[in-house]
Image (cartoon, coloured by chain):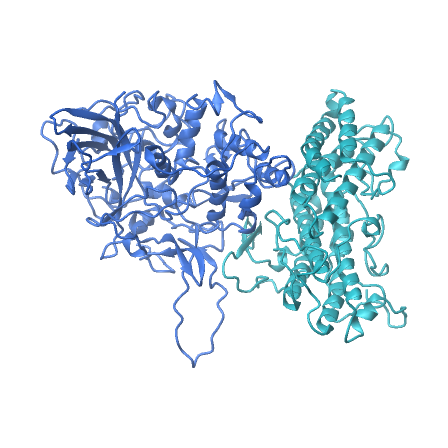
Amino acid sequence: MAPSATESYPPGLFDRLTSTTSPAIKDLQEAAQLALQVEFTTIPVYLSALYSISDTESHAYQTLRSVAMEEMFHVNQAANIVVALGALPKFTGDAVPVYPGYLPKANPKTTPMVGLFRASPDVFSNVFAAIESPAQYGAPPQGDNYDSIAQLYGALITAVNAYPGNPFRTTDVPGRQRTNIYLGKFGGNVNEVVDKESFHAAVNEIVEQGEGTVPPEKPLVPVESFGTYNHYGKRTDGTYGPILGTPYEMSHFLKFREVALDSGNFPPTLPIISNPDSSVYTNPRARRLADSFDHHYSLMLRAFEAAFKAGAPDPYFSVVLSIMHRVLPHLSRALMSTPAFAGGDGSVGPNAAPAWLYRSDIKRTFEELTQELEGEVNQLSTSSRESALNTHLKAALAGDKEILMAAEALGL
Amino acid sequence: MPDYKIYPPIGIARVGNAPDKFYIGPETYRGLPTNPDGNPFTQDDFRDGQGRMCRQAARFHIFHGDEEVSLNTPGVKSITWTVHMANKKASWYEFATNEGEQGYASNHPLRNAHVENRHSLIIDPGPRQISGAHAGPVPMDRHTIPEGYKGANFPEGILYPNRERIDTLGELRTDESGRLLVLGGLGISGTEDENAVIKQYANNDGWWDDTADGRVSAVIEWENGSSKPAETAWVSVAPPSYAPEIANLVTLWDTIFDSAVRAGHYPRINDQGIWQSGPHGYKPNFQSEIKPLLERATTYTWVAAIPPKPHSFDMEMLGAVPNKEDHYRGLRNWILDILRPPADENTIISGRGATMMPYLAGDNCLIDGTLTSNFLRLTDTQFFFVQQWAAGHFVNEPVADGGPQSLTRNILENCVGGAFSPGIELTWISRNRAIYSSEDPFRINAAPPTEGPLNLGFSPAAMEPGDLTRYMAIPWQADFNECSSQPIGERVLWWWPAQRPEFVYLEPRPEIENLAAIPTPDEQTGGQVAWIGTDFDQLRGDFISFADDVQMVQYWSQLGFVMEKEVKGERRFVEVARTLPRPFTPDGN
């Protein structure tokens, strides 16, 4: 729904970006940081739903996983834009998304309410597909709000184009761009942003991957010198296999739409609480695990922010990737197997779920987090009802122990 | 134990249809072949002047410790080589994935079960000898059977569809220093049945091919009149290697080495069945035991349709040995976690939702049952190395290349070590420790010379000519054609892209100078194309293969090779020396 012409908006970031012939670098930085936060906001939303799906081989799980991973690519690429504009990407403090809510600075009248939900066909269609919905042609963002992610990028592109000269720098900036942290088979390549051209290429890749504005038969990059079989996915011959470029069918929007329409085959999910709030839990273990999750998450965000700082030790491969890959997924599933309320049954629910809260109130060291988790593992019973919890907590603890030394060396 | 040994203990020759011109198989890992005249190998050397595919000779050396002994060695008067090869494929059991690896069951069918005279199903020219420098060719054909040899046999009639006869299993030559060169057959396969129908990938009654294997022995005669035998080796003839510079993730060396490690030959790695793990255990060398695995994944992107990004690795980070600080453990773990672990041969998606690697078909994805093994995995030893590396227990040191052990490793690393269904050079018989010497983990127990006829059974302590290749597909072209892609569940997996390419890159076509015409961009320029067949439908009969296996029997020698070249200023692996038209439509006759 497009906003009606009679409504008026106070002049905001988007007015400043789109109505001037010489936008301020500060506004460009703010818009790029906003893009980063918008991309980031989607990740916990997707991951909460992802971990609630118990069959990792299911089409819904695989689809959602591929989108969540590609959002990490978008975050990385947006962070590079922020760095090239001379600012430091922010991942902590008020840059951390709060749920439930709207995408940062999104128009509440035209964009979906996003939250942390147990996966279902309705969540795929009403939340996920809505987040990634294509832009309406020619509708510019107004005031401080936008109606779609593409519109937000549109405003940024307009402003960068209007900027006299090259707003991007690779030297004498406080940040460092990263092109080596987006791992795996998923779409897109993170590139360094050095000028308007590389900026356009970067933004196009993000927007087209999200919403798929490319005609179906065209690969995203029309002529690549080699390496054209970039993705594996559902092919037009109906099988799973190598795919040329990024066709329209692989846009996030259509991927979600496809899962939502095939509701009969939607996989089983864990009985988790949506938009969880651990303060209402009456099962003490659920509260402790929720707390542990939030502290791990917060520590990871601080380390991630540091990974983009020039000249500082790089915690990415020693701490960030390990928490992301070997700790948080297991803690999530441990939480999701734990009844939120005293005396509950984990197979019936309602079970706890990660709240993705940024904790700056109490800072715990990584060593404390590891010790707490070890205490939690020691308290586990050997009951077969708790076997999933058992497996996941032990895996998370093993992950913690691997990170411990590196985290201490970095003073985390 | 003799002081003199022939190396490599297992040498690989490859078929070709050029009668004279040949090259020597690569003796370096991922290397190009060698020209007999010593000139640098170019793309023109894959074929002779008439466009026929050259045979690849297996070269054998004699070593005394680490010193090579040849006709150039002072005191050596002569070296006499004896080779006895045979093809026992038609006389053996049918190949049915891994059934038979632990011994055949009583109901396991024989090939050509109706033929009573089983010896008539063996191709056996008897032994041949050669000595001197630049000697030969000494043919192993039907016309030169040694006097007194009782087991000689060749298929009688004209073989269809190509109307050819199998008259020879190859020939012997020597090089300038008297080293042995063994050339295999001419790639002739066929059946006396004029309809020439291939019904399946591995077992086709009535069919023959001219691959073979057998023992290689040598006697060194000294100028003082004494002589000394060298410990025997084995030669095996295989299909062509169409991408010699690209290696398989699991090579034949890895597979035989793994069986030797688990049998206790390398107690530093595995002592009495216990893996030597942890900080004080075995520390794999990144340069020789980890990096090659990652590079193999990278080079696969040139011969299979797989995404390059996740197969590209930062070797500096991954090879950084942790001292006080370990900056890259997360990255190493990330790789460990997507590798299919032992006992997970049927897992494609891990518990975390990741697609497990390698994305290659396994030993048994064809027959349902207790032995199902859908997907390939690293050998136990390779996986152990990766585990130790991920945990930070590794070294990063240059490796000295040279000497007989390196020669063995290099030659076998250019061969397929799995999946064995049945495979390219050898199948699962290669990991049966019973066929190897208990003292020399790569050396096959050779039976003493025989006057024939050859044994029809299995005697691992005394292996006979033909006992290694008889498990392979008959004709080899059937398996070679079909084993391109494999539907397993909802996925289509790849087989041996490093040996049998699936998708290749072409060299850019020369630009036609026509200023009048408006240039049109070609979206396929520089893109991957199917090596054989079509690529748009994974369910089509000719998806990256010939629709009919018989077409592989007809056209195998015209297929292109993949070679590293500089294209537009970049190093790329591109298809060269193809004589089959592209696109190619078989005439249907």
Q: Is residue B88 visible?
A: no
Q: Quadrant of residue A207?
A: bottom right
At a point 82% along the width and 31% down the height, the residue shown is A339
State left or right for residue A230 relative to residue A374. Answer: left
Q: Which chain is cyan?
A: A
Estimate the x, y position of residue A229 in percent, counting from the top left: 53, 54
Q: Quadrant of residue B234?
A: top left
Please tell me which residue lies in front, A221 or A247: A221
At a point 48% along the width and 29% down the height, the residue shown is B381
Estimate the x, y position of residue B10 in percent, counting from the top left: 31, 33
Q: Is residue B460 visible?
A: yes
Please tell me which residue lies in front, B589 or B482: B482
Please tell me which residue lies in front, B400 or B165: B400
Please tell me which residue lies in front, A309 or B146: A309
Q: Which chain is blue?
A: B
Estimate the x, y position of residue B64 in percent, counting from the top left: 26, 29
State left or right for residue B588 relative to residue B129. Answer: right
